[in-house]
Image (cartoon, rainbow, N blue to C red):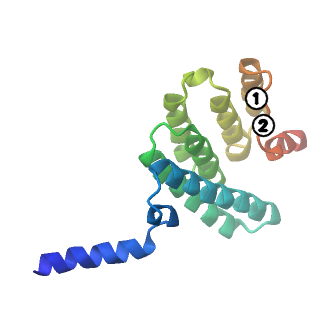
């Protein structure tokens, strides 16, 4: 009887905190999209806070975003967007070893592997923002453009940082 009560309590408690998409009975991809959207918002907010000098809150937001992208990648192991954004979040959080692991994950997920433009974009982001090496980042962006001449950085922040360097 006690075991049944414990299970019933666990179901009731976790049901209250489940994401809204789960309550609607939607599929795992919709839950993943909602989580990616939330993580993306945290990532952009972290960038804004870093630009304003609020490093403590920016690091907290970036760590939370990385945790969200890791959750999505655990649910959907082939989600390239989660791997790309997770690497950016780790970089903004100052976790370079973790960012390098995200690069490796993206290389495993991407159909073209190390010949994927997103792979080289993430490397450039880590080199520029995390390692403060714009000379190396330019090389990675050059490789990205050679693989896909129409590719453009999705965010102007990277391009602006290269110009400032």
Query: Pointer 2: residues within 10 angstroms few (<14), some, or many (20+)?
Result: some
Residue 54 spot, x, y in % from top left: 74, 69
Query: Which quadrant of the figure contains the C terminus?
Result: top right
Return the residue at label 2: 153
Return the residue at label 1: 141
Query: Which quadrant of the figure contains the N terminus?
Result: bottom left
Label count reads: 2
Indicate which disc residue 8 carries: none
- For the point 58% across and 23% down, which residue is it? 114
- For the point 69% across and 38% down, which residue is it? 127
Residues tagged 1 and 2 counted as in contact (Cβ below 8 A): yes
Q: Which numbered disc flags the more N-terminal residue, 1 or 2?
A: 1
Mark 2 falls on what kind of element?
loop
Residue 32 spot, x, y in % from top left: 52, 51
Position of residue 104 in the picture relative to residue 144 (left or right): left
Residue 144 spot, x, y in % from top left: 72, 25
Position of residue 101 in the picture relative to residue 10 (left or right): right
How far separated are the C-alphas under marks 1 and 2?
9 Å
The mark lying in front, picked from 1 and 2, is 2
Above or below: residue 103 compared with residue 97 = above
């Amino acid at each position: 009887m006690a075991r049944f009560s414990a299970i019933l309590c666990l179901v009731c408690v976790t049901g209250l905190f489940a994401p809204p998409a789960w309550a609607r009975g939607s599929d795992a991809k919709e839950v993943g999209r909602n989580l990616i959207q939330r993580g993306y918002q945290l990532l952009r907010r972290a960038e804004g806070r870093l630009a304003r000098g609020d490093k403590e809150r920016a690091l907290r937001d970036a760590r939370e975003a990385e945790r969200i992208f890791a959750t999505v990648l655990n649910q959907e192991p082939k989600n390239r967007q989660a791997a790309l954004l997770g690497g950016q979040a780790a970089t903004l959080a100052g976790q370079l070893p973790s960012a390098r692991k995200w690069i490796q994950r993206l290389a495993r997920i991407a159909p073209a592997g190390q010949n994927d433009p997103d792979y080289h974009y993430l490397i450039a982001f880590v080199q520029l923002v995390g390692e403060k090496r714009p000379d190396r980042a330019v090389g990675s962006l050059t490789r990205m453009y050679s693989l896909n001449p129409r590719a453009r950085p999705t965010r102007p922040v990277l391009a602006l940082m290269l110009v400032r360097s």
